[in-house]
Image: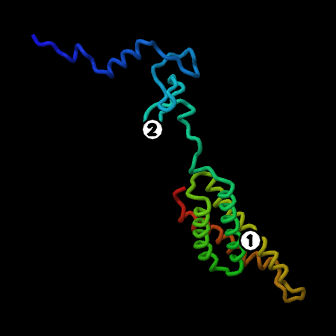
Amino acid sequence: MAIDEAALHPAAGAVEAVDDSESGPLYCYRHPRSETYVRCGRCDQPICPKCAVQGPVGFRCRQCGLVRNATLSSFTPQQLALGIGASFGGGAILGFLGGQVGFYSIFIAFFGGSLIAEAMVRGTGIKRGPIMRVLLYGGMLGGFALGALLQIAFFLNAALPDEAALPLEFWLQTMLPYIAIGAGAAVAGAYSRVRWF
């Protein structure tokens, strides 16, 4: 009868596993009454199922497993300033020009919105999330409103005091609709450029 040598001499890893289990259960570092046999894959602290976070290669504790920075949705102050400047400033320019060029503001605003979105992506980096959408679309629409107000002020200052001056109602009826349509076209152009966020 042949004797199985592997049964008599277990592998070194099996001996270590037996030695580890003979030392008894571990207790979670946050919940001292919870028994566990699981350790954090990074800091090697014992963790219970309540504290375990699934990491890329195993379980981790809450401190090691949570993402420190959401790089796709967090901004530095410089990125935030560049993003607001690009969207708000670009929207103001398009809003001011929209009243002056009339029907052509639709085409100019569509391509201008795409350029504003590209400038914002380059200024802030590739970001995603609701903050990025508010910065782009909200800033552009706010800039359009400022551009429309500047257009009204420019129109009122340029009006002559004699009877040849055009009334404000003429401006509101002829130019304001093109500014509003241009704002929609700019948002559509920006969306076509950065629809991924």
Query: x and y percent of residue 113 in the render?
Result: 61, 69
Label 2 SS? loop
Residue picked out by circle 1: 147
The image shows residue 25 at horizontal and vertical percentages of 47, 14
Quarter holding the N terminus?
top left
Between 48 and 160, the one lying in front of the other is 48
User: Can you give x and y, in whole percent of width and height, for residue 195 in the image?
Assistant: 53, 60
Label 2 Cα crowd, 10 Å radius (few <14 / some 14-19 / many 20+) = few
Q: Label 2 amino acid? A: Pro
Q: Which residue is found at the position 59% from the left and 72% from the top?
A: 110
Indicate which label's residue lies in the foreground, 1 or 2.
Answer: 2
**Residue at the image position 88 percent from the left and 88 percent from the top:** 163
Residue at 46% from the left image edge and 23% from the top image edge:
38
Q: Residue furthest right?
A: 161
| Residue 194 in the image: above or below residue 76 | below
- Left or right, 128 with respect to 168, comes to left
- Residue under label 2: 56
User: In the rendering, which numbered label is found on residue 60?
Assistant: none
Across and down, in percent, residue 158 comes to 83, 83
Q: Judge from the rendering whether residue 11 lies leftward or rightward of residue 176; answer left or right.
A: left
Mark 1 secondary-structure assignment: helix
